[in-house]
Image (cartoon, rainbow, N blue to C red):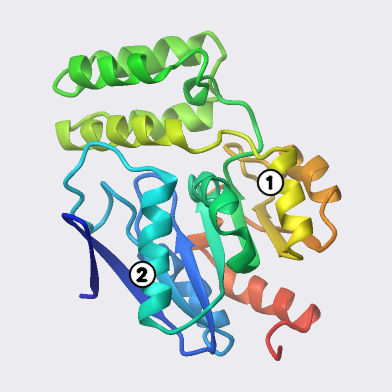
Amino acid sequence: MPFINYQQHQIHYYQYGNGDALMFAFHGFADSGNMFEKVARVMYKKYTVIALDLPFHGETLWQGDIYKPEDIQAIISQLMKDMSVDSCSFMCHSMGGRIIWGLLPLMAEYIDQLYFFAPAGFQYAFTASRFFCPLWFRKRARNRYEESEGMLRFFEVTHKLRLMNRATYLVFKQQLDLPRRRARLLQTWISMYYFPMLAGKRHCTLINQNHIACFFFYGKKDRITPAKYSYKFVKQLKKSELALFKGNHFFLRDKLPDQLKDWFSENHLLST
């Protein structure tokens, strides 16, 4: 299995395709880089895809308690140097959208294209709020609830108060039944403090100034990150497309390749 060493950490990644352009992929919470395998089958002639297992996920061995945008940037820069490339593209699913928003201010001048699959980063989330869930609160929650069921009660109350939609609540709930899953959730929650909850004017400006093409894909039945929250942002971009596919939030693992191949063909991207 391919790994890259970064400080005291070992980052596992999957490599797909043999295209001249380099693409980095960032998965969602409780997933891994292999979720992009089907998508890479469509893109393999245009891109070489490096799908990372993010810290606390997959086969990556992350020795610290948190990670920040600067850590992911350093890993990407090291891989770009190893592969002798000066620019790259990103794609993401769900939480991976927040990874991109954290990286954009650090790497905008090196980015060619962005592919967003049901991305987070376009809607307010109570549990992601820096105001209502500050860093000290997240760290205290980790120390108190990592070995208990208290975290489940926190999410139940948040859901009952309608501060979290039911689809998101159910996804988080299934991650709380084992100590190692709770630990992953809490460590990721703390780390996400350093990544923007919402894409803002600064991100839009960076995308337009650097002429980055952006492509957004959503499942028509997505209840976790529905497309409606991104419409306003997408309209402000100079080079963007938005497409709705069959499926829900996890449509990326379903029959996406056929739908994406049709979209690529219609937009003449397979041959460019």
* Horizontal side of residue 180 vs 163, given as left or right: left
Q: How far across and down, in percent of the image, does residue 51 sit?
A: 40, 67
Q: Secondary structure at mark 2?
A: helix
Q: Earlier in the sequence, mark 2 or mark 1?
A: 2
Label 1 neighbour load within 10 Å: few <14, some 14-19, many 20+: some
Q: Quadrant of residue 21?
A: bottom right
Q: Residue at x 54, y 53 (%)?
A: 106
Q: Quadrant of residue 152?
A: top left
Query: Above or below — where is 155 with respect to 207?
Result: above
Q: Residue at x 37, y 31 (%)?
A: 189
- The residue to which callout 1 is attached is 203
Between 212 and 232, the residue placed more toward the observer is: 212
Label 2 neighbour load within 10 Å: few <14, some 14-19, many 20+: some
Say which amino acid is labelled 2: Gln
Q: How far across and down, in percent of the image, does residue 150 sit?
A: 25, 13
Between 222 and 101, the residue placed more toward the observer is: 101
Q: Quadrant of the N terminus?
A: bottom left
Say if residue 31 shows up in the picture.
Answer: yes
Q: Quadrant of residue 156?
A: top left
Q: How far across and down, in percent of the image, does residue 167 sit?
A: 52, 32
Say if residue 248 shows up in the picture.
Answer: no
Q: How far across and down, in percent of the image, does residue 225 sit?
A: 61, 40
- The residue to which callout 2 is attached is 78
Say which amino acid is labelled 1: His
* Horizontal side of residue 109 vs 192, given as left or right: right
Label 2 vs label 1, nearer the camera: 2
